[in-house]
Amino acid sequence: MKCERNPIFLSTIFGRNKHKDLNQGEKDMPEDKAKYLQRIIDSIGHPFYVVDVKNYLIRFANKACGFDESYKNSTCYQLTHKCLNPCSGEHICPLERVIKTKQPVKTEHIHYDKEGKPRIMEVHGDPVFDEKGNLIMMIEYSFDITELKKAQDELAQKLEQVEKFNKAMVGREVRVLELKKEINDLLVSFGKSPKYPSEE
């Protein structure tokens, strides 16, 4: 499913609002637009920020990102990966993918929290276009899936143990059946009746 851009939302964010109903609402706003926008994105409980497509600089970020006040002079890769270059290798760069495809992207990255601890993040990048259809920014938001990944790994390990145990039990059962057959064959060779019923 493809979502269409919302020109009302974008024009409100970037100050090109030509819609009367929203202009009226702006008159009633007790704060300037930047503070109003900051309050809105701070209400999001997951890291959320807006990246300039020209230079990777973060233009807006919410409190959940954990960035200090100097974030506006920093790139997304400096703040989230502690790197000097954009993401590459196992971490696809959401911004490069959005620039290339002009479509939303989803990937997994290792980001670092305030204490410098690595966290596994599901990263979403969504393009932001101006009114002429030019890509100008990317919204990036992420969800910490570290605990989910740990639980999945633990579950995979337990399933592997169950499979090993199951193989061992099946192997043991097969061996028991073989031994019963050998005992029966020996008894018959001595002219006696088989001790175990036939499993065939």
Image (cartoon, grey):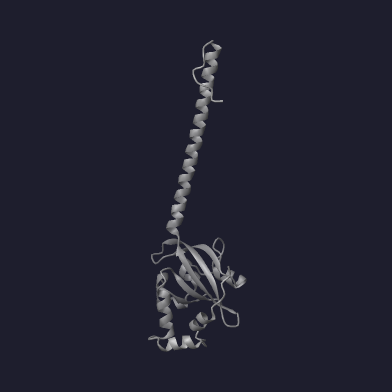
When asked about the image quadrant of residue 158, the answer is top left
Residue at the extreme front of the image, as rendered: 21
User: What percent of the width, then of the height, locates residue 30?
Assistant: 37, 86
Tell me which residue sits at (52%, 32%) in the image. 171
Tell me which residue sits at (50%, 41%) in the image. 163
Residue at the extreme top of the image, as rendered: 191
Tell me which residue sits at (47%, 86%) in the image. 21
User: What percent of the width, then of the height, locates residue 112?
Assistant: 44, 64
| Quadrant in which the N terminus appears | bottom right
User: What percent of the width, then of the height, locates residue 74?
Assistant: 47, 75
| Quadrant in which the C terminus appears | top right
Tell me which residue sits at (40%, 78%) in the image. 39
In this view, the residue in front, 4 or 93, is 4
Q: Is residue 176 above or below residue 68?
A: above
User: What percent of the width, then of the height, locates residue 178?
Assistant: 53, 24
* Numbered marks: total: 0
In this view, the residue in front, 130 or 83, is 130
Q: Is residue 162 above or below residue 101?
A: above
